[in-house]
Image (spheres, rainbow, N blue to C red):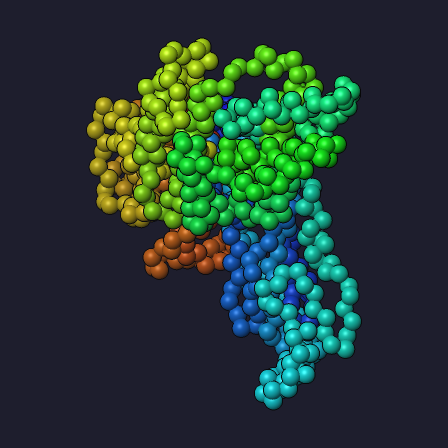
């Protein structure tokens, strides 16, 4: 939660640095430079290497992005019979990840330098050329963004004669059924999907390591300072949550009553005080070690950078975790218990009777096994959260934190048994702890359903439905804490204490906080765990009724091209094609407001939501200007009769976005968004010297529009 509040505050400060409009003397920006090379890995395989150098204070969005986020980096390799792609483009180092409060998703990007590689299998016996292009988006820390576009051109050497000879041998072996030759071929042929193996051909030693692979991985651990700080904060927060989970596990019904029995174990016999303390420390360390081992196993088997993407998109993974959280919740409600085999607990308990320091370890193991029915759901939730981070370390440190929190009360009480008298008595309050966890687990299980809905565009779990479920859950939690709902293991509550009252207030307050979200409020403090606003079915501001100008909007000259898939904010209107907008501006004798934007432009969306809804701005847009809203990253192709070869770069422009970007560069020598200019539709010249970039103050924007209108009237 603190992470998201911090990021929102940073975004606010970024916006405050752009309270005044920019001048039009800005030049075309190209913050990313590329270097291309080809590295052969063996006789018939090579890697296409693409090095990106990113200017200071800029970042380049990466390949894999969550649905609804900025424009991802896209590599297109033209098809050819000369080669075959193997696998997907690989990226190093690991990208920086942070939460974007505009898109309301986690975004990933590279800073300073990045390397991308694509493995290929060479099929040609002659040298050949691979062509293609790169599309992406880079943004400056002050908010301006630019499209990144680069042509690919690789000169690839031919397949070696050795490989040709080996293939001939393989074909002969296949035709004649020669088992011996086939066995030899099995040792020299590399699978197309093997990304890291170097092939050793018969009759030729090849023990040299893959230099290219070394180059690609040498920067894996050199992450930007901002990334490291962000990761450190996130990791520290997760550790604190894990420790809290361990302490909460002690308060459950199958753990808390065991405290006196466990502490009495260290008070048996004639052991000295020092020896008792030593055994207590061994006991606590053993608990922490056992849980840490569980985290290590999860880290080694399932954690990794690709798991984050999998959890965001895979219906299988998200369905499994949804079911797990539901099972954990129902277990805490008392529907059933999750227990390990009793035989396992009995065997470990037998080892305790042997005494000695080793007995402390087996005492810890017995406690972990016996308490699993209560701690299992908490441990499972922490492991899912840790694995979902994509980091190998989070499951391990998470379990270490849980083990520390769980062992701490036992260890301290074993060292100071007199504190036992100050502990509260066992009772129904312990089952209340389990039920509170059950409600929380139910709420967070909805996140996995939302992941499926968003990734596959199923539209079965809208944002308002999701929030409705959460509101009901937290109201029910408050009612339960008041003692008005009882489960099978609950005791009578004659009165409620101060702490329970605080929890009741917190639960009802959170439910009330969620209510505005049903009508379109941002709820930015929890936006990471609820669906984005694009999934909202009902918005009280739909149609702009609360913000529209009192003056009726002027009619457009004709139906906007591309209006079936491109849209204006509610309450505003205009065109998506420059020529169509210019024709209408001439017909209605109005100035032309040209607005260069992008689907993946965070600040474009932020500016629209904060500026365009202002009544004065809306009045200008609807009545005094004709607006051309030009998307520079629109991938759809224009009608064929609109295709042309650019005078700027000599390339054929087919896609709508490429045409709009070409216009921005050609006419205004700028390639960043958002970018507003006011144009005379007759001369196509700027009416005023000023242009407008990112702006959060409606008065500054209306001043800009005022100047343009006055210049047009003159």
Decide: is 663 above or below 595.
below
Q: Residue at 44%, 32% (x, y): give it.
A: 332
In the image, 210 versus 658, the foreground residue is 210
Quadrant location of the C terminus?
top left
Classify residue 429 by image quadrant. top left
Task: Give the side of residue 13 with respect to residue 688, left or right.
Answer: right
| Residue 536: image location, x then y, percent | 32, 35
Task: Give the side of residue 640 with respect to residue 153, left or right.
Answer: left
Task: Give the side of residue 99 with respect to residue 230, left or right.
Answer: left
| Residue 370: image location, x then y, percent | 56, 34
Q: Residue at 59%, 39% (x, y): give it.
A: 346
In the image, 101 versus 371, the foreground residue is 371
Q: Is residue 94 visible from the viewing direction of this image?
A: no
Decide: is 513 above or below 650.
above
Task: Give the side of residue 296 with respect to residue 670, left or right.
Answer: right
In the image, 323 versus 363, the foreground residue is 363
| Residue 127: image location, x then y, percent | 64, 72
Classify residue 652 by image quadrant. bottom left
Q: Residue at 39%, 41% (x, y): give it.
A: 449
Q: Residue at 62%, 31% (x, y): give it.
A: 403
Decide: is 143 above or below 638.
above
| Residue 307: image location, x then y, percent | 54, 47
């Amino acid at each position: 939660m603190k992470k998201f509040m911090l990021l929102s505050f940073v975004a606010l400060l970024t916006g405050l640095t752009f309270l005044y409009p920019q001048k039009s003397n800005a030049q075309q920006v190209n913050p990313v430079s590329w270097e291309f090379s080809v590295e052969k890995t063996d006789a018939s395989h090579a890697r296409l290497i693409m090095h990106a150098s990113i200017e200071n204070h800029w970042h380049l969005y990466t390949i894999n992005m969550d649905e609804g986020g900025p424009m991802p980096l896209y590599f297109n390799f033209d098809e050819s019979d000369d080669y075959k792609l193997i696998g997907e483009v690989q990226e190093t180092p690991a990208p920086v990840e942070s939460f974007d409060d505009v898109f309301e998703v986690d975004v990933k990007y590279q800073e300073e330098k990045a390397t991308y590689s694509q493995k290929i299998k060479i099929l040609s016996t002659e040298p050949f050329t691979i062509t293609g292009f790169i599309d992406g988006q880079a943004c400056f820390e002050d908010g301006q963004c630019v499209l990144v576009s680069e042509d690919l051109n690789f000169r690839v050497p031919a397949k070696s004669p050795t490989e040709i000879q080996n293939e001939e041998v393989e074909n002969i072996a296949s035709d004649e059924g020669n088992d011996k030759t086939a066995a030899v071929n099995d040792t020299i042929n590399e699978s197309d999907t093997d990304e890291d193996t170097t092939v050793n051909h018969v009759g030729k030693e090849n023990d040299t390591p893959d230099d290219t692979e070394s180059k690609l991985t040498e920067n894996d651990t050199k992450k930007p300072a901002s990334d490291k700080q962000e990761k450190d904060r996130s990791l520290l927060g997760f550790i604190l949550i894990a420790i809290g989970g361990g302490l909460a596990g002690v308060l459950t019904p199958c753990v808390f009553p065991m405290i006196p029995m466990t502490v009495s174990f260290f008070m048996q016999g004639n052991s000295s005080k020092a020896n008792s303390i030593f055994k207590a420390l061994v006991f606590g360390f053993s608990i922490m070690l056992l849980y840490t081992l569980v985290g290590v196993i999860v880290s080694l088997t399932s954690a990794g950078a690709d798991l984050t993407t999998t959890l965001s998109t895979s219906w299988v993974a998200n369905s499994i975790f949804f079911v797990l959280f539901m099972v954990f919740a129902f277990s805490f409600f008392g529907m059933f218990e999750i227990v390990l085999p009793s035989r396992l607990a009995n065997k470990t308990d037998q080892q305790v009777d042997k005494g000695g320091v080793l007995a402390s370890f087996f005492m810890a193991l017995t406690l972990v096994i016996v308490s699993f029915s209560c701690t299992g759901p908490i441990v499972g939730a922490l492991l899912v959260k840790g694995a979902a981070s994509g980091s190998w370390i989070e499951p391990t440190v998470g379990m270490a934190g849980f083990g520390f929190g769980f062992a701490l009360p036992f260890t301290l009480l074993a060292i100071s048994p007199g504190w036992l008298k100050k502990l509260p008595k066992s009772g129904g309050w312990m089952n209340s702890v389990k039920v509170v966890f059950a409600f929380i687990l139910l709420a967070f299980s909805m996140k996995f359903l939302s992941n499926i809905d968003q990734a596959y565009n199923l539209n079965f779990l809208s944002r308002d439905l999701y929030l409705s479920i959460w509101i009901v859950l937290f109201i029910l939690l408050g009612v339960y804490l008041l003692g008005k709902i009882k489960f099978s293991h609950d005791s009578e509550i004659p009165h409620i204490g101060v702490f329970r009252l605080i929890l009741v207030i917190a639960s009802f307050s959170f439910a009330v906080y969620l209510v505005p979200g049903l009508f379109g409020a941002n709820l930015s403090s929890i936006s990471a765990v609820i669906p984005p606003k694009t999934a909202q079915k009902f918005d009280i501001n739909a149609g702009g009724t609360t913000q529209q100008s009192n003056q009726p909007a002027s009619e457009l000259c004709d139906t906007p091209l591309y209006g079936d898939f491109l849209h204006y904010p509610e309450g505003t209107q205009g065109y998506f094609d420059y020529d169509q907008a210019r024709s209408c501006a001439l017909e209605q004798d109005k100035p032309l407001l040209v607005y260069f934007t992008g689907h993946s432009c965070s600040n474009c969306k932020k500016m629209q939501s904060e500026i365009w809804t202002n009544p004065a701005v809306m009045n200008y847009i609807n009545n005094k200007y004709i607006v051309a809203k030009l998307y520079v990253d629109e991938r759809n192709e224009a009608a064929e009769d609109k295709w042309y070869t650019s005078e700027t770069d000599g390339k054929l422009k087919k896609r709508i976005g490429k045409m709009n970007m070409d216009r921005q560069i050609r006419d205004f020598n700028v390639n960043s968004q958002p970018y507003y200019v006011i144009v005379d539709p007759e001369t196509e010249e700027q009416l005023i010297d000023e242009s407008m970039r990112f702006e959060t103050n409606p008065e500054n924007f209306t001043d800009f529009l005022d100047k343009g209108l006055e210049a047009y009237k003159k």
